[in-house]
Image: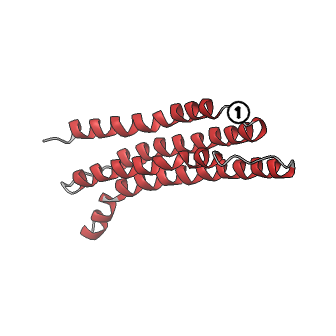
Amino acid sequence: MDAGITSQFKDLGLILVLALSACGSAAGAGVAGMAAIGAWKKNFGQNKSASFLLVALVGAPLTQTIYGNIVMTKMFELASKGHYLWGIGAFSGLAIGLSAYYQGKCAACACDAMGETGKGFGNYLAVLGITETVALFVMVFTLIRSQISYSF
């Protein structure tokens, strides 16, 4: 195999972890954003005040992109030593991205409920925090495992 092609494949895991995390963040924020807009529309149509707190719910899935970047940074150190990390990149990126997507779906439900009742913001944040914990676990366990596996 050509050395140029080989070096491109070496970076595939790095690209995957960040890209899949970011795709999940984009999809999650998009789903939550659509729900927030719908909730605001209902409020405006009823001449009720529209809560700006919904923006915090919409933005919750964005942090998973940061977690993907943190994992990618560690993977870059390992890739520079010649390790191919496709599996780590693909599966940790997928797990982090799915966490973001489902957090966005939870946020969408929270936007709908908060838009209708104006209550429960703390409860909704707690659910989003639990969903976020999956991404944090994946990031931490990936960092720990990659440190153990490739420390020689």
| Mark 1 closeness class: few <14, some 14–19, many ≥20 residues within 10 Å | few
On the picture, is 147 further left or further right than 59?
left
Relative vertical location of residue 119 with respect to residue 68 in this rendering, above or below: above
* Residue tagged 1: 119
- Place of residue 92 in the rendered image (x, y in percent of width and height, measured from the top left): 41, 43
- Place of residue 83 in the rendered image (x, y in percent of width and height, measured from the top left): 23, 51
Q: What residue type is labelled 1?
A: Lys
Relative vertical location of residue 30 with respect to residue 104 in this rendering, above or below: below
Q: Extreme left residue here?
A: 152
On the picture, is 83 further left or further right than 22?
left
User: Is 78 or 100 nearer to us in this picture?
Assistant: 100
Residue sitting at 52 percent across and 40 percent down? Answer: 99
Q: Extreme right residue here?
A: 46
- Place of residue 37 in the rendered image (x, y in percent of width and height, measured from the top left): 73, 53
Number of marks: 1
Residue sitting at 66 percent across and 52 percent down? Answer: 33
- Place of residue 152 in the rendered image (x, y in percent of width and height, measured from the top left): 12, 42
